[in-house]
Image: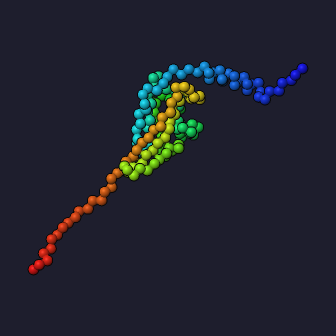
């Protein structure tokens, strides 16, 4: 008689088999319509996405999916087809770059729109979002007065 020792316990294998069969069976009947709308605000970037059906997934900054300040996943309660995500400038790995011609600041970040709150699906998309904030022209203005003085008497 041969005794087989399992590296993993039977409950773990059973749970794994159930999860893997559910993952393979997930069908998301939704997708993004067009490209996101972006608002470059004073202190944040706001991104709106339009979906074909109500959105119940999550939006997060690439590489920061577990940081509570860098994702939003309460869309199921909102029952919306146009979810939005606000992200403060410089947060969640957002890159900034100073520009000298024209003078100003670029901010950019990659956002992931995920249609399932736990799994990556084939309809998920990522967008690199950029905003440019032009520096105000601070030219110096001064009044010049000219007074003619007669040098010859």
Query: Image point 66% across, 23% down: which residue?
Result: 20
Q: Nearer the viewer, residue 114 or 67?
A: 114
Query: Image point 39% across, 46% down: which residue?
Result: 133
Residue 9, image x, y percentages = 77, 27
Q: Quadrant of residue 148?
A: bottom left
Query: Image point 40% across, 44% down: which residue?
Result: 132
Location of residue 137 with respect to 124 vertically, above or below = below
Which quarter of the figure is the C terminus placed in?
A: bottom left
Which quarter of the figure is the N terminus placed in?
A: top right
Location of residue 7 with respect to 135 vertically, above or below = above
The coloring applied to the image is rainbow
Which residue is at the far front?
Answer: 101
Which residue is at the far left?
Answer: 153
Residue 29, image x, y percentages = 51, 20
Q: Quadrant of residue 38?
A: top left
Q: Nearer the viewer, residue 2 or 45?
A: 2
Residue 22, image x, y percentages = 63, 21
Residue 73, image x, y percentages = 53, 32
């Amino acid at each position: 008689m041969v005794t087989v020792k399992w590296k993993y316990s039977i409950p773990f294998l059973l749970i794994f088999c159930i999860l893997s069969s559910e993952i393979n069976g997930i069908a998301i009947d939704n997708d993004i319509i067009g490209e996101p709308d972006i608002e470059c605000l004073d202190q944040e970037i706001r991104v709106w996405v339009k979906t074909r059906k109500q959105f119940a997934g999550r939006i997060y900054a690439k590489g920061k999916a577990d940081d509570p300040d860098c994702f939003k996943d309460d869309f199921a309660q909102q029952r919306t087809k146009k979810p939005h995500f606000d992200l403060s400038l410089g947060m969640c790995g957002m890159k900034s770059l100073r520009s000298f011609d024209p003078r100003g600041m670029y901010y950019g970040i990659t956002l992931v729109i995920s249609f399932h709150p736990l799994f990556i699906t084939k309809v998920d998309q990522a967008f690199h979002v950029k905003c440019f904030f032009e520096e105000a022209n601070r030219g110096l203005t001064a009044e010049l007065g000219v007074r003619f003085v007669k040098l010859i008497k």
